[in-house]
Amino acid sequence: MSILAAMAAGLAMGVAFGFLLEKSRVFEPGVILGQMQLRNFLMLRIFLASVASGLIVFALGTLTGMIPTLDPKAVLYGAQLLGGFVTGVGIALAGACPGTVLAQVGVGYRDARVTLLGGLAGALTFAYLEPVLRPVLLTGSPGKLTLHGLLDLPFWPLALGFAALLIGALYALERWRPWRAELGTDADGVLAPPAPPVEAAPDGAEPARR
């Protein structure tokens, strides 16, 4: 694939990703904070669906020969654990993640501009500090670990099996808590506060609310 073709493919995938991200409303701060607080599970549904679809695509690609080899990244315990923790804290504080903040800027959330600038400043800071952090974050790697490699099994049946499990989990989530109810009346993931309890009133009188 030529460089221009790769750039065109990347642009097309980016446009599709941004469109679907906005239509799913998973970029909403209320949805993101609700997931971090375990109040709703819209983000989890999106992630499970994307992983399941990716597993199916890669399984079919390796089975048909369209994807001849898989090249996973090496495991880096320090970088992945510490980086995941710092990213999670940032998501919980800002109500945005590196992908959704761009959608927030696009739809007009003004505070998302500050979040975007902060993310760029953090990336620039890490670039300058990487030589100092490298001994802590980028050492002690066990190499490339894959489940099919550890089990000595072909990739495609294992991938399809896990995809089926994820689809089953998505079905169970939907039966437990329908996504429309979790999205809220304003499609922003912010649910209406519960109605105040009604106090018992004497016969003939209007019930009083606390």
Image (cartoon, helix red, strand yellow):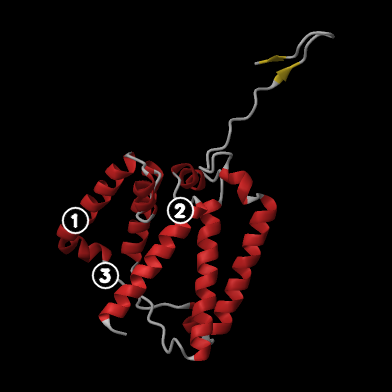
Q: In this view, does 36 lie to the left or right of 207?
A: left
Q: In the figure, 8 relative to 116: above or below?
A: below
Do the residues bearing badges 2 and 3 touch, measured as CB atoms within 8 Å?
no
Provide residue 122's location: percent of width, then percent of height. Answer: 23, 52
Q: In the figure, 170 relative to 203: above or below?
A: below
Q: In which quarter of the image is residue 108?
A: top left
Provide residue 202's location: percent of width, then percent of height. Answer: 81, 8
Quick one: SS at disc 3?
Answer: loop
Please tell me whether mark 2 or mark 1 is closer to you in this view: 2
* Number of the label disc, if any, that sits on residue 139: 3
Q: Is residue 89 left or right of residue 185?
A: left
Distance from label 2 to label 1 (Cα)? 27 Å
Distance from label 1 to label 3 (Cα)? 22 Å
For disc 3, the neighbor class at 10 Å (few under 14, some 14 to 19, many from 20) is few
Q: Nearer the viewer, residue 184 or 37?
A: 184
Q: Is residue 195 left or right of residue 37?
A: right
Q: Is residue 56 left or right of residue 200?
A: left
* Number of the label disc, if any, that sits on residue 22: 2
Q: Which residue is drawn at 37% across and 65% down?
A: 14
For disc 2, the neighbor class at 10 Å (few under 14, some 14 to 19, many from 20) is some
Q: Earlier in the sequence, mark 1 or mark 3?
A: 1
Can residue 74 be seen here? The reply is no
* Number of the label disc, if any, that sits on residue 174: none
Q: Nearer the viewer, residue 89 or 25?
A: 25
Q: Which of marks 2 and 1 is nearer the N terminus?
A: 2
Distance from label 2 to label 3 (Cα)? 38 Å
* Quarter of the rendering occupied by the N terminus: bottom left
Q: Which of 143 and 25 is in front in this view?
A: 25
Provide residue 189's location: percent of width, then percent of height. Answer: 53, 43
Do the residues bearing badges 1 and 3 touch, measured as CB atoms within 8 Å?
no
* Number of the label disc, if any, that sits on residue 124: 1
